[in-house]
Image (cartoon, grey):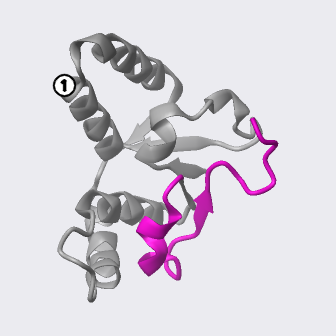
Amino acid sequence: MILLDTSVLVDADLSSLDPAESYAASILSRAELEFGVAVAPEDARFGRRARLEFLDAAIDWLPFDEESSRSYGTLARAMHAGAPAQARRTDTFIAAQAHRHGVPLMTRNARDFQRVASLVAILTWPPPDADPE
């Protein structure tokens, strides 16, 4: 399994993912996407809602459970050690879920996770060997 970060879920063409691999996403990413729908300008709201409904049908949303909270403690220490105040907390929770399940995290923003890359495998979307669009 590969955990997809919110940055991938926003607009990546999921049909281009490896069909031999299984994918999931954090329920926290779903919450971020709900927020995106809520704050979108009126003309963009329908498209964002449609994308979220598509994802609901296509993705398994992983709950943030007790084991994930244990992983969060470990990753938060690494993620926020010496980090600027604006370090993204949701990223740490999502990375904790990847850590808890022992799976890689696929993101468009690998820099956001560089502090925990020794604890969680970070994959970049699109993959470096992907065909240019």
| Region of the chain picked out in magenta, as a range | 108-133
Q: How far across and down, in percent of the image, does residue 102 sit?
A: 53, 66
* Quadrant position of residue 124: bottom right
Question: In this rendering, would 74 be left or right of 55?
Answer: left
Q: Amino acid at mark 1?
A: Ala
| Furthest-bottom residue in this view | 82
Image quadrant occupied by the C terminus? top right
Magenta residues, dominant SS class: loop
Q: Is residue 31 magenta?
A: no
* Residue on which disc 1 sits: 38
Residue at 32% in and 63% down: 68
Residue 17, position as x, y percentages in the image: 69, 38
Quadrant of the rendered structure where residue 31 is? top left
Residue drawn at (28%, 76%), measured in percent from left and top? Answer: 76
Q: Residue at x 78, y 47 (%)?
A: 130
Is 86 or 28 nearer to us in this picture? Answer: 86
Tell me the residue at 28%/40% (across/down): 32
Q: Is residue 41 above or below residue 119?
A: above
Please name whichever residue, 132 or 57, is drawn nearer the observer in this view of the structure.
Answer: 132
